[in-house]
Amino acid sequence: MQEPVRKKYKERSTILAALYNLLPGLGYFYIGKFRLGILFALLYPFLFIIVNYISDYLSPRTNSIFFLGSYVVLVILPVIHVIIRVRKEQLHKVYILQRYNKVLLYIVFAGLAYVYTEYLKDLTYEIHRIPSNSMQNTLQVSDRVLVKYNWYGIYDSYSGKRLLNFHTPKKNEIVVYSSDEEGYRELFLKRLVGEPRDTIHIIERNVFINGIQESDNPNFKYDNIRRERGFVNWNIYPKGAKWNEENYGPIYLPAKNDIVKIDSNNIVLWKPVIIREQNQILSKEEKEILIGKILAKGEYEVKNNYYFMLGDNRTNSWDSRYTGLISEEDILGRVEFLVYNPDVWERMGIILK
């Protein structure tokens, strides 16, 4: 006589169902709603992309409300819905385990969520919180800004290369970029003030670009303590330069295919650029400059365009004066506008200048 199939029972946790559904569809699988889980998992990325592109046609203030509403619909409501289903169907008391309630399924969903985070977000927007005062007076601490990550192109975070180019970064744009800090890469949000083939020179707090004083940004500020020309800030880029944050340069921003002269006097200036492009150690043997094991012969052909970034709070900003020149490939997104500030709700939907 054939034994009856024994069903495995295990109640569903309301908290786990809610947390799982933060990964689109996984919470529905957890409570046995297979078709709903598949539908939500497939539609969610496309819905998010559609929402982002609709925002291109809205005013900043309307966009702020639209994004907050979209966040509630796409993230909060599915979590609330799965909690209601658990309680309504008494799944927190009794549940028959399904064949797909396996650990492997949860691992696969986590992997797909990681792929979305690393790659598909580059097709969309992302809201960033401003953590410091480095962009005052334009941006305040706790401001939430909308960053368009697909404006300049599609970026591969593993190779550090731009896969596709859409737009060229322009002067006075507020951008998000990555920079190498102590062996790992960090994200920064600053204003772009210098483009390829510009020469940047800061004299007594005044920024000169190709000999012409900066006039596009009325929002920058300094504190009341001045740094005289003789004062040396040893954290300044390049190492060893007898400059400070208020008296800096001149420094040239190379463009792609530029030929720059390198010697023992300026090796500290070009060393980060060459290491970034060649992934080779730059060294000096007697009077010769070596890139890896290849003799540089006194010159180097630059492979990328380079930019100069400054925070609007010129006294308290860790920017290109400290981190060095920024490759175009490291510029990840453009800041579109100020969405809101939870501490100051009057700061909503503001166009940034």
Image (cartoon, grey):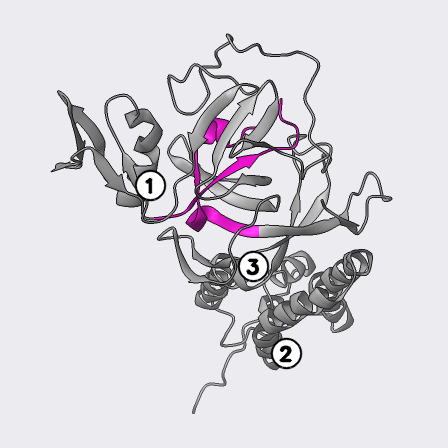
List the residue tagged with mark 1: 276
Does the magenta segment cover residue 105?
A: no
Q: Are marks 1 and 2 in contact (CB under 8 Å)?
A: no
The N terminus is located in which quarter? bottom left
Instruction: Give the SS element for disc 3.
Output: loop
Q: Are marks 3 and 2 in contact (CB under 8 Å)?
A: no
Earlier-in-chain disc, 3 versus 1: 3
Q: Position of residue 85 (x, y in %)?
A: 73, 71
Q: CA distance from mark 3 to mark 1?
A: 23 Å
Residue tagged 3: 151
- The mark lying in front, picked from 3 and 2, is 3
Distance between mark 1 and mark 2 Cα atoms: 47 Å
In the image, which disc is placed on residue 110?
none
> Amino acid type of disc 2?
Leu
Query: How far across and how far down the image is residue 286, in percent?
Result: 13, 20
Q: How far from the left and from the top, in percent, is residue 138?
A: 72, 37
Can residue 253 be seen in the rendering of this structure?
yes
Task: Give the residue type at disc 1.
Answer: Arg
Q: Residues within 10 Å of mark 3 (few under 14, many from 20)?
A: many
Residues shaded magenta: 304-333
The residue mark sitting in front, 1 or 2, is 1
* Mark 1 Cα shell of 10 Å, populated few (<14), some (14-19), many (≥20): some
Q: Quick check: 201 above or below 241? A: below
Q: Which residue corresponds to the image point at 50% horizontal and 7% vertical from the top-left?
A: 230
Res. 36 mark: 2
Sequence-wise, the earlier of marks 1 and 2 is 2
Type of the residue with mark 3:
Trp
- Depicted 178 relative to depicted 252: above or below: below
Q: Residues within 10 Å of mark 2 (few under 14, many from 20)?
A: some
